Image: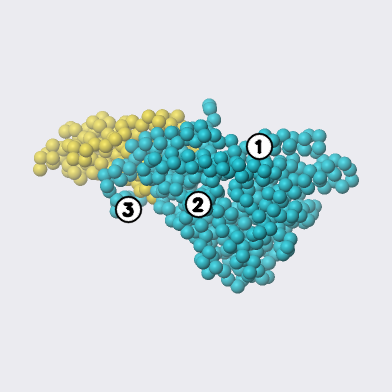
Amino acid sequence: MRKPIYLDYSATTPVDPRVAEKMIPWLTENFGNPASRSHAFGWEAEQAVENARVEVAKLVNCDAKEIVWTSGATESDNLAIKGAAHFYKTKGKHLITMKTEHKAVLDTMRELEREGFQVTYLDPQPDGLLDLEKFKAALRPDTIVVSIMLVNNEIGVIQPIAEIGEICRSKGIIFHVDAAQATGKLPIDLAAVKVDLMSFSAHKTYGPKGIGALYVRRKPRVRLEAQMHGGGHEKGFRSGTLATHQIVGMGEAFRIAREEMATENDRIRMLRDRLLAGVQDLEEVYVNGDLEQRVPHNLNVSFNFVEGESLIMGIKELAVSSGSACTSASLEPSYVLRALGRNDELAHSSIRFTIGRFTTKEDIDYAVKLVKERIGKLREMSPLWEMYKEGIDLNTVQWAAH
Amino acid sequence: MAYSEKVIDHYENPRNVGSFAKDEKGVATGMVGAPACGDVMKLQIKVNEQGIIEDAKFKTYGCGSAIASSSLVTEWVKGKSVDEAATIRNTQIAEELALPPVKIHCSILAEDAIKAAVADYKKKYGADAEPDKKAAD
C-alpha cells in the first residue's frame, strides 16, 4: 500500500536525517553515562549533553543552566504545574488555565483539584485567543500558577504570552507556558517575555520522540518540587539517567530550527495559503481560529454538512487529523472547537492540516484536488446538504436525538 | 480505525444514494438521528400496490459505518413487505458489516430509520390501506 501524504506535522514530525545522523554514535561507540565522573566515557557524554543544552537555550534565548531535560512536553507540563503548585501551596491554592489547553495541562490541573487546589478554566474568544480582560478578572489574591500555551495544537493560534507574563509578574504569580507546538514556528525570546516555566518537546520540531525539556527561570528564581525522585540528576529537578542520544538529537533539531526557521516558515506560509485558497473554492467552509495570530503551519477548517470521520475516510490518501474524536472510543467532537463556540456539526466536520519541512507544492495541490472531489461526493450523500440546498434552516428542525 | 471490507465497499460504492420526490406515490420517508450526535440518516421506501417495497434510497450524514449501514438496508428492504422490513434488527446489520462495538449505534440508527420509514408509510397510507386509495382521497 502506498503511504498517504503526510499533513499531520503537529502530531509529530519525522526526525530530520541530519539529526538522526548525529544521534547514532551516541548509541554505539559513545555510550557512556553522562553522570559518570570517573572516566572519559562519561566526560564525553556529559559534554554532548551540555552542548545540546546550549542549543536548546539558544533557540529560546535563555541561559543553558535554565534548561532541565525531561521525557517530553507532557512530563514538562506535569513537572512545571504540579512542581510549582506543590512548592508554592502555602501562598495560595488557585490556578488559572484555558479550556483549549492540551490534555497534559488540563489533566494535571484536574489532578491538582483532587488534591484540594482550585482551578479556573477560561473560555477562549471565538477566534481561539485569550481575552486579557477576562483573564485579569479571574485572578485572585491566592492565585499561584497560570498556565497558558503559546501555540494551540489544534488550531495553531498564538496566545499573547508577553501580556500575560507582565500581568503575572506584577502580581508574583508563576507563569507556565506549554511551547510544544511553538519551537521552530515562531521566535521565542525568554529574555524579553516574563515567562517562568516553559515546556518543550523534540519530536514536534524534527527531533526524536521521548525527549523534551523544561525551562526554569533563574532570575527571579523559580522553585519547583521534584516529581521524579532518584539520583538527583538535573539539579534535583528530575532524576533519571540522561538519554544522551535523545538529548543530542533534540539539540541538533533545535539548532537547525534556529538557523532555518525564517526561510522555512516563508515557504510553509506560501503552501498554507495555497491550501486555504484551494479549499475555499468550496461552499460552506469555515476556518477555525484566528488566521492572523496563528503559526503558518496550521490550517484547521470545517466543511459544513459533512461528517468528520467519513471525511477522513474519504481522504485516506492524506494523513490528517479530525476534530471529531469519533476515531477513538468516544463520539465527542473536539473540545477545543467546542470551546470556540463552534456547533457540534462544524466541530465534527473539521480537518486539521499541518504542513512541515518536507511538504511540497505537489502535495498541497493533490490534497486540494482530493478534498474538493470527496467533499462533493459526501455532500451528494448528505441529507443535511440536501436540506440546506432546499433552503431549510437546520436549526429549526426537530431532531430525534439518540 | 480499521474498517471491515464490507464497510469500505459500501462506503466507496454506496448503493441507492438519492431521494425520491416527496409527493411520489407510495413513497415514505424515515429520518433519524441528529447532527449534534454526528449522524443523520434519511431512508426512503417506495411501496407498490401489493405493499411490497420495490425501491429504496438513502442519504446519510455520518461516519463510514453509518453510511454502510444505511446503504446495506436499502438493499435488504427491497422486495420485502413493509412489515417484513420492520423486522430487520440492528444485530443482523452489525453482523453483516462486522461492526466493532463502538459502531453498534450506527446499526441501531439504521434499524430506527427503517422503522421510521414504515411508520411514515402507515401514517400516510393507513395501516392496511393500499397506497392508491389514500392517494385518491
Which of the two discs, 2 and 1, labels the residue nearer the N terminus? 1
Which of the two discs, 2 and 3, labels the residue nearer the N terminus? 2
Taking A26 as reference, is A81 left or right? left
Front in this rendered view, residue A219 or B49: A219
Q: Who's the residue at 55% across and 51% down the image?
A: A152
Q: Colour of chain B?
A: yellow
> Residue A146 location, x and y as percent?
60, 62
Q: Who's the residue at 81% across and 43% down the image?
A: A45
Q: Is residue B110 visible?
A: no
Pointer 1 residue: A16
> Residue A119 location, x and y as percent?
57, 64
Mark 2 vs mark 1: tell me if same chain: yes
Residue extending farthest to the right is A38
Q: Residues within 10 Å of mark 1 (few under 14, many from 20)?
A: some
Taking A84 as reference, is A351 left or right? left
Residue A60, disc: none
> Residue B38 location, x and y as percent?
40, 46
